[in-house]
Image: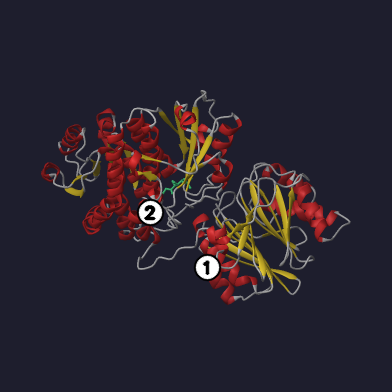
């Protein structure tokens, strides 16, 4: 959460700062700000709202200079106000700082600083860092760039919590300081200048190479060179310079109105990419370069634990059903924010997979680190192979879904479920899944992208259904087996995009309490494909209809029973039972999208959300 961009070099920093921030809006969009060194003085511009408001502010009050730092905020401490927008100054006013993360001991530090005469200008936790660094710098005899590095080290040793920071000081010319603990930060290296960015995608096209800062590292840079060291004075890890070409490129909407819409329609392609080179036709199995373990080692995996948050957790849950069905390997799914603090037993023979589109989610990363500390093998399933989870895990699987800009996860969900299905196939083929069965599954997988494309043709049908029900105040989502996680995902999509209250349950849970919510104005959405539990779902639908509840069903093409019974039906092509979640979720993504549009919501940037949740 929160995005940082910095620039130092030969050109005007402002265009880089503004465009870079625009590319980072997925990390937060409550307010934005920039500090630019203009003829030896730091000038700050801030605006509440999206980065476009900051662009307008700078148009009205122009500023330029060859170094600067900028920030797009997702509020944690302190309301969404101009004072709380970053950058924040120190007591002298000569230092400006941007921050992504949370200072856990900010209250104590604030009290100490106040007792030394500091008067805070904001309610943020961040301002304690700018003030601490400024105070240490001003207290030092050394007013050089090295002096600022020393001051930052001294100050950061007092800070508990997470941070990625960018710092500019008006006495030190074109010079930026950066540090990282818990929140991501990269240095971008270009010919005419150098950059700081929370995500290399923010500076794609400008920097040719980039370097990720590692945990606990501090860096300082001018337009030509950079240095990295441990905050605590320790030697840094060897610097790995990566080519910018491999970083995800910032996307455009193309012919679509919204990124979410585009990303929903990209799924045939993203699923093809997820399978490319990973299916071994003659052996009827799958393989992943990121999980290079001998068959003997893989056979020793007796239990898998999947951990993640939000949509990634829902995908994990679908994976649990599918993998247990295909391979008979027991799977447990754990919500990362709970798992990280639970004293859960970790048997030998357990492999842990951290699922995260961004690869930066704070809770998922922390859960993975805790497991790694306990000695179990950890794997990341991420959409960014350079993300912190990908880099810190023992191996993993790249989702290859392409950059997902819409805050609501769509194509990453189907790629996660597909990758887990392939993992199930691989593990199954090492156990009891026969060659012929493996080949059958493989050929079903190969057909999947075309079935997804066919399913997406329901777009217009779903748009009409969305119009009909958009005014409803709440929705129920119900499904069984691997389509129960689809119900969870459909409910999550709808609530985050349209702010409508939703809940999701296994269909059979209806009569254990949920049915009390059924009335004439609360639609129930049943995910009821023609699988082995179809009849059971039908009975549950009857129960809702008997109480006059409107029912929208997602079923299988050719199904007229549902059409007779339900108020509205969306049909998806027939496929193997274990593949249905990848098809049935599509009408639910479309429904959330169209209801959001119908209600005039900002579907790509829903209120209060951010795409990359890098705080706990
Ligand atoms: C829902 C959504 C969130 C994320 C969650 C985890 O549409 O986007 O629920 O799924 O914040 O994010 P990642 O997958 O990046 O770890």
The answer to whether residue 44 is above or below residue 135 is: below
Q: Name the image quarter holding residue 209.
A: bottom right
User: Quick one: SS at disc 1?
Assistant: helix
Quadrant position of the C terminus in the picture? top right
The answer to whether residue 425 is above or below residue 35 is: above
**Residue at image point 25% right, 57% down:** 459
| Mark whose residue sits in front, 1 or 2 | 2
Figure colour scheme: secondary structure
* Residue 150 visible in the displayed image: yes
Circles 1 and 2, Cβ within 8 Å, touching? The answer is no
Q: Nearer the viewer, residue 68 or 451?
A: 451
**Residue at image point 45% right, 28% down:** 299
Q: Residues within 10 Å of mark 2 (few under 14, many from 20)?
A: many
For marks 1 and 2, give the CA distance: 33 Å
Extreme residue in the right direction: 141
Q: Which residue is mark 1?
A: 53
Is 441 situated left or right of 129 in this image?
left
Q: Which mark is residue 270?
A: 2
Q: Nearer the viewer, residue 348 or 229?
A: 348
Is 39 situated left or right of 314 in this image?
right
Mark 1 vs 2, N-terminal side: 1
| Residue 558 screen position, x and y as percent | 13, 46
* Residue 410 visible in the displayed image: no
User: Quick one: SS at disc 2?
Assistant: helix
Is 144 situated left or right of 436 in this image?
right
| Residue 554 screen position, x and y as percent | 22, 45
Q: Name the image quarter holding residue 282.
A: top left
Q: Residues within 10 Å of mark 1 (few under 14, many from 20)?
A: some
| Residue 606 screen position, x and y as percent | 43, 55
**Residue at image point 58% right, 36% down:** 369
Q: Which mark is residue 218?
A: none
Q: Name the image quarter holding residue 284.
A: top left
């Amino acid at each position: 959460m929160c995005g940082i961009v910095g620039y130092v070099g030969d050109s005007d920093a402002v265009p880089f700062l503004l465009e870079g921030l625009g590319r980072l809006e997925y990390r937060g969009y409550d307010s934005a700000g920039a500090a630019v060194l203009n003829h030896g003085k730091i000038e700050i511009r801030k605006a509440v709202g999206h980065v476009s408001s900051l662009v307008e502010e700078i148009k009205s009050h122009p500023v330029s200079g060859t170094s600067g730092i900028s920030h797009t905020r997702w509020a944690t401490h302190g309301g969404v106000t101009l004072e709380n927008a970053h950058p924040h100054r120190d007591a002298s006013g000569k230092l400006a700082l941007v921050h992504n993360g949370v200072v856990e001991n900010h209250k104590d530090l604030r009290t100490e600083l106040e007792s030394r005469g500091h008067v805070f200008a904001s309610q943020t936790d961040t301002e304690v860092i700018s003030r601490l660094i400024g105070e240490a710098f001003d207290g030092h005899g050394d007013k050089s760039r090295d002096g600022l590095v020393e001051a930052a080290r001294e100050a950061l040793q007092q800070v508990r919590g997470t941070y990625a920071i960018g710092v500019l000081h008006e006495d030190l010319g074109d010079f930026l300081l950066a540090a990282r603990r818990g929140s991501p930060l990269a240095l971008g290296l270009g010919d005419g200048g150098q950059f700081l960015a929370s995500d290399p995608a923010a500076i794609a096209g400008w920097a040719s190479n980039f370097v990720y800062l590692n945990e606990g590292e501090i860096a300082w840079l001018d337009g030509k060179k950079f240095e990295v060291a441990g905050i605590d004075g320790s030697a840094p890890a060897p610097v790995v310079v990566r080519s910018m070409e491999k970083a995800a490129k910032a996307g455009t909407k193309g012919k679509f109105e919204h990124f979410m819409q585009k990303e929903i329609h990209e799924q045939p392609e993203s699923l093809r990419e997820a399978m490319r080179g990973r299916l071994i036709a003659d052996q009827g199995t799958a393989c992943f370069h990121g999980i290079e373990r001998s068959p003997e080692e893989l056979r020793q995996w007796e239990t898998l634990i999947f951990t993640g948050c939000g949509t990634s957790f829902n995908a994990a849950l679908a994976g649990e059903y599918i993998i247990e069905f295909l391979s008979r390997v027991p799977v447990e799914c754990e919500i990362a924010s709970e798992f990280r603090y639970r004293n859960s037993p970790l048997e030998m023979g357990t492999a842990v997979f951290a699922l995260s589109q961004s690869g930066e989610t704070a809770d998922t990363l922390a859960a993975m680190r805790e497991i790694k500390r306990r000695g179990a093998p950890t794997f990341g399933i991420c959409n960014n192979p350079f993300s912190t989870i990908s880099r810190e895990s023992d191996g993993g699987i790249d989702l290859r879904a392409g950059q997902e800009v819409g805050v609501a996860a769509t194509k990453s969900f189907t790629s996660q479920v597909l990758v887990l299905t392939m993992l199930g196939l691989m593990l199954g083929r090492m156990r009891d899944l026969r060659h012929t069965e493996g080949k059958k599954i493989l050929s079903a997988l190969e057909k999947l992208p075309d079935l997804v494309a066919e399913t997406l043709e329901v777009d217009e049908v779903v748009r009409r259904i969305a119009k009909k029900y958009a005014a409803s105040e709440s929705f129920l989502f119900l499904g069984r087996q691997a389509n129960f996680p689809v119900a969870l995902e459909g409910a999550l999509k709808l609530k985050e995009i349209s702010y409508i209250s939703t809940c999701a349950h296994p269909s059979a849970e209806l009569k254990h309490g949920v049915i009390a919510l059924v009335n004439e104005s609360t639609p129930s959405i049943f995910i009821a494909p023609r699988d082995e539990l179809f009849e059971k779902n039908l009975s549950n639908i009857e129960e809702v209809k008997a109480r006059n509840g409107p029912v929208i069903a997602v079923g299988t093409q050719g199904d007229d029973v549902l059409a007779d019974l339900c108020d509205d039906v969306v049909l998806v092509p027939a496929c193997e039972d274990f593949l249905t979640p990848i098809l049935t979720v599509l009408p639910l993504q479309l429904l959330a999208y169209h209801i959001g549009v119908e209600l005039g919501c900002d579907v790509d940037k829903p209120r209060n959300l951010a795409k990359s949740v890098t705080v706990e």
